[in-house]
Image: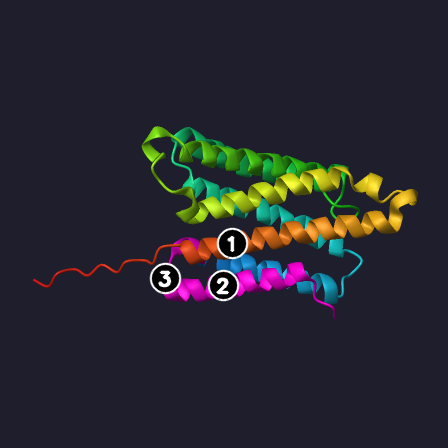
Amino acid sequence: MQVSVSTIFEILAFLASIYFYLAKRNKVVLYFIPFLFLTVAIEFWGRLGHFQESFTKMAMYNLFTTVEFIFYSFLFYLHLTKSSLKRTVLIFIPFFLVAVSYNLIFIQGLNKTFHSYTFLLGSFFIVIFCCCFFYESVLPERIDDQLSKQPFFWIASGLLIFYLGSVIINALFEYLSSNDLKQEGKNIYNTITRSLNVILYSTFCIAFYLCPAHKKTYSSRS
């Protein structure tokens, strides 16, 4: 089985999450371990797994990308500070789950095709959440903080690039897969998609490296 460069970076990010959690015991890194394990497992299952007619590879990716949006939204809920923005994230999560469920049951289907409608919706909100984080980062009370040393800055940057790029490339998918550009368009689509994955998982690794170590506290003996 040929392993793509993007898959290698997914595996590296997963291994980095384990290493830096063991070294630093940081909760944010801990949250990434099961998520990245699932990411790698889905990648290999998609390549090697056998699917029944009632559950196709497309259904697996539809469900997994839904989990991705919920996970990333949860991270933004943890890192945004304004209560109004945190409330927006909390409202988005159940709203998105309802939208995905309706789309997969009544519109695009679970097995038929990729849930591009709700993927676009989720991508839009993740980009908005990224912008909210950057907005909070330049507020007067935080203007002295060095962004490049903040772990979540790298995560938000990777997500912003990834989802902006994904929206653009998916919007052009039908054109790239047309008869005139069928093979060349497919190559362009795969190259850009894999490059976006490399960027995303590279920023995760940088964030894990920058995460502060959990400081142990000891209660004084009486």
Q: Residues within 10 Å of mark 2 (few under 14, many from 20)?
A: many
| Image quadrant in which you'd find residue 214 | bottom left
Q: Residues within 10 Å of mark 3 (few under 14, many from 20)?
A: some
Residue kind at label 1, given as amino acid type: Phe
Q: Which residue is mark 1?
A: 204
Q: Is residue 155 left or right of residue 167?
A: left
Q: Marks 1 and 2, Cα distance to the nearest angstrom?
A: 9 Å
Q: Are marks 1 and 2 in contact (CB under 8 Å)?
A: yes
Q: Which residue is mark 3?
A: 24
On whether residue 130 falls in the magenta region, the answer is no
Examine the rendered structure and indicate whether residue 156 appears above or below residue 85.
below
Q: Residue at x 42, y 37 (%)?
A: 80
Q: Is residue 155 left or right of residue 161?
A: left
Q: Are marks 3 and 2 in contact (CB under 8 Å)?
A: no
**Residue 218 can be seen in this image:** yes
| Image quadrant in which you'd find residue 194 | bottom right
Q: x, y percentage for residue 187?
A: 80, 52
Q: x, y percentage for residue 122?
A: 61, 38
Residue kind at label 3, given as amino acid type: Lys
Q: Which residue is mark 2?
A: 16
Q: Residue at x 47, y 41 (%)?
A: 76
Q: Residue at x 39, y 32 (%)?
A: 82
Q: Marks 3 and 2, Cα distance to the nearest angstrom?
A: 12 Å
Magenta stretch bounds: 1-29
Prevailing SS of the magenta stretch: helix
Marked residue nearer the N-terminal end (1 or 3): 3
Residue kind at label 2, given as amino acid type: Ala
Outermost residue to the bottom? 1
Q: x, y percentage for residue 102?
A: 68, 37
